[in-house]
Image (cartoon, grey):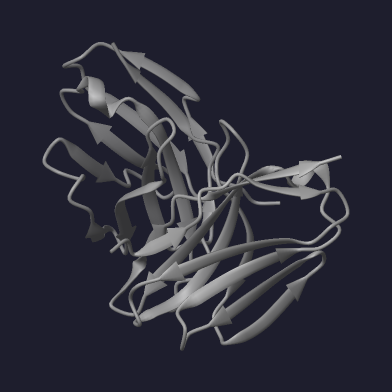
Amino acid sequence: EPEVTQTPSHQVTQMGQEVILRCVPISNHLYFYWYRQILGQKVEFLVSFYNNEISEKSEIFDDQFSVERPDGSNFTLKIRSTKLEDSAMYFCASSGTGYRNTEAFFGQGTRLTVV
Amino acid sequence: QKEVEQNSGPLSVPEGAIASLNCTYSDRGSQSFFWYRQYSGKSPELIMFIYSNGDKEDGRFTAQLNKASQYVSLLIRDSQPSDSATYLCAVTRYSSASKIIFGSGTRLSIRP
């Protein structure tokens, strides 16, 4: 069964460093997402991506964040100058095989720890 | 007002009984409704989705949608200990179909 894969599963970084989280969405999906979940809190929307551009982004997704689809399979989230409060689980998801967006499937997540 | 509201629980249900999980949403423009299950430390796993008013059944799960009352529910029949998890209600809106908004989740515990 197709699945969304994320790497790495756990990333530890020093405050102020840049990190890149990687995702391979389900191959025929057209919509890609990044969500984050701070420990004990709700799943929060960061950004959605469709047709090689950002569709929507939340207020969390400021200039510190960027997304890219560098090739036909990968979808990345870059966090510049990480802060302690960026520590969270980051989930990639994908959905939609046609014009209508449908249910989203999540990857297993990357646990980011900023020290 | 939160966009998607759920009772945080925990909801404790005996094994074999029916678990009933509820969710309300604030935006009448919401179009698609999802239930995800999340085990501790794991990612959300889609278990049901519903787009139209009424009931939708899939195995032991039934999703119910009432757009007039702005609520969506999930029934789990013959509850098993493996159903113990946090259940997340999520919605999308016509105005922003690519943004899935999650509730805070209801923690369900199935007691043997």
Using the rendered view, name the quadrant where residue B1 is placed.
Answer: bottom left
Apparent side of residue B95 relative to residue B7 in the rendered image (left or right): left
In terms of depth relative to the viewer, which is nearer, B83 or A10?
B83
The relative height of residue A18 versus residue A71 in the rendered view (above or below) is above
Image location (x, y in percent) of residue A83: 20, 22
- Identified at 14% across, 43% down, the residue is A62
Q: Looking at the image, can residue A101 be seen? A: yes
Q: Is A98 or A47 nearer to us in this picture? A: A47
Q: Residue at x 44, y 33 (%)?
A: A40
Relative to A94, is B9 on the left or the right? right
Whether residue A98 is visible to the viewer of this picture, yes or no, is: no
- Classify A48 as above or below B49: above
Image vertical order of residue A87 relative to residue A69, above or below = above
**Residue at coordinates 57% horizontally, 65% vertically from top-left?**
B22
Q: Position of residue A38 (x, y in %)?
A: 37, 33
Which quadrant: the C terminus of chain B?
A: top right
Question: Looking at the picture, how far across and down is residue B75, in whole percent?
Answer: 71, 66
Q: How many marks?
A: 0
In this rendered view, identify the residue nearer to me: A1 or A10: A10
Point 32% across, 43% down: residue: A70
Residue A91, percent across and down? 44, 41
